[in-house]
Image (tube, rainbow, N blue to C red):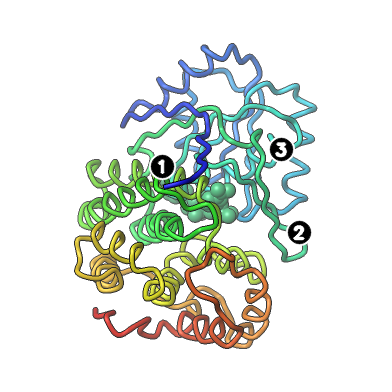
Amino acid sequence: MKFVHDTLGQRVRFGSGAAAEMLASEVTERGAARVMLIAAPAEQRLAERITKDIDVALNHHEVVMHVPVEVADRARQSAVAADIDLLVSIGGGSTTGLAKAIALTTGLPIVAVPTTYAGSEATNVWGMTESARKTTGVDPNVLPKTVIYDAELTVSLPVEMSVASGLNALAHCVDSMWAPRADPINQALAADGIRTLSEGLPQVVDDPGGLPGRELALYAAYLSAVAFASAGSGLHHKICHYLGGAFNLPHAQTHAVVLPYVLATNAPSAPQAERRIAGALGSADALSGLAALYAKLGAPRALRDYGMEHDQIPTAAAALVKVVPESNPRTLSTTDLSALLEAAWAGDNPGHSWRT
Ligand code: NAD
């Protein structure tokens, strides 16, 4: 075994029903006097509950998926004008993403309170969109100093969005098996993330208001994001990143749809990863394990249901062939990528062991 593994420094506080208390301790310990609260209008009521014990100097509500640069610029100007010393983000990956965009240019610390399973809070990756092109980068300043996980905050996330978001987390885990910096540490985190998600997500579907499944899903979202931050973007993330930016597709659903096709494509060339994923799913083989989970969850299955047009496939395949990571277990031609996208667009059976 030979590898180099960087661990990101971050505090994690986890406690159901304890977000307000944990946030107040965090603000006091940090000596923050001018907090900027970032929360989308839809998460306002949640945010009011969580910030009831702290002083908020500035409320910022303009949150847009994939962080358009003009939205980031307005938020940065507001933060500087209000002399902010701490960013508190409450919401899904789009909200965390905006806090990261502010931190990128101002160096302000972030305390992130996630309300989905996207996992952005545990990575040092930022993303912004300009003219239908999504740019991402890595910067230590954008890693939230503290993450506050409270599973009660995810109870209001509708089941369909919970499933898609949970499968976004699962995709972080699966892709971490063969991403450019995959190593035994991030693979171990990923394997336990897969196991925990496959236990927690069906509970969320059966009992959306119950905490046990929500806690497992949220904990696994963290594992998955730590694995992803360390392993980097594999084939799956390269595909979804492009589709999201170029065609403005919804992030979580796009990941959920594409995952079975990437697994079916890579698994035969990555037997060790395949066995690890199968084991974590409690199945004889990885693809049939994923099929069983997707069936239990009523998972999203076709890109055409989420706004992708059929005539966008050739453009996407031509762009994606240039970004397939060298670490990918097999090489892929434009024709291979077209076939993958064609099947994902239509929701076709991803492989022979996919049975629903
Ligand atoms: P999102 O943040 O856009 O939220 C999706 C929807 O769910 C929104 O309408 C939001 O208002 C609603 N919502 C959020 N929490 C809720 C709750 N508890 N109850 C009810 N409704 C709720 O979507 P997302 O999937 O969380 O995040 C997607 C974004 O995150 C993308 O831009 C993606 O690129 C980014 N992301 C970044 C990283 C990274 O490492 N940088 C990782 C994952 C995702």
Mark 3 lies on residue: 104
Q: Earlier in the sequence, mark 2 or mark 3?
A: 3
Q: Mark on residue 222?
A: 1
Mark 2 lies on residue: 130
Res 94 visible = no
Disc 3 versus disc 1: distance between alpha carbons? 22 Å
How busy is the neighbourhood of tag 1: few (under 14 within 10 Å), some, or many (20 plus)?
many
Residue 233, horizontal then vertical, whole percent: 55, 57
Give the residue type that dot 2 points to: Glu
Which sits in the foreground, 193 or 1? 1
Q: Quadrant of residue 145?
A: top right
Q: Earlier in the sequence, mark 3 or mark 1?
A: 3
Asked if disc 2 and disc 3 are in contact, CB closer than 8 Å, the reply is no
Residue 176, horizontal then vertical, whole percent: 45, 55
Q: Is residue 87 above or below residue 246?
A: above
Residue 16, horizontal then vertical, whole percent: 31, 32
Answer yes or no: disc 2 within 8 Å of ligand 1: no
Give the residue type that dot 1 points to: Tyr
Query: Which residue is found at the position 72% from the left and 64% from the top?
Result: 133
Q: Is residue 307 left or right of residue 36?
A: left
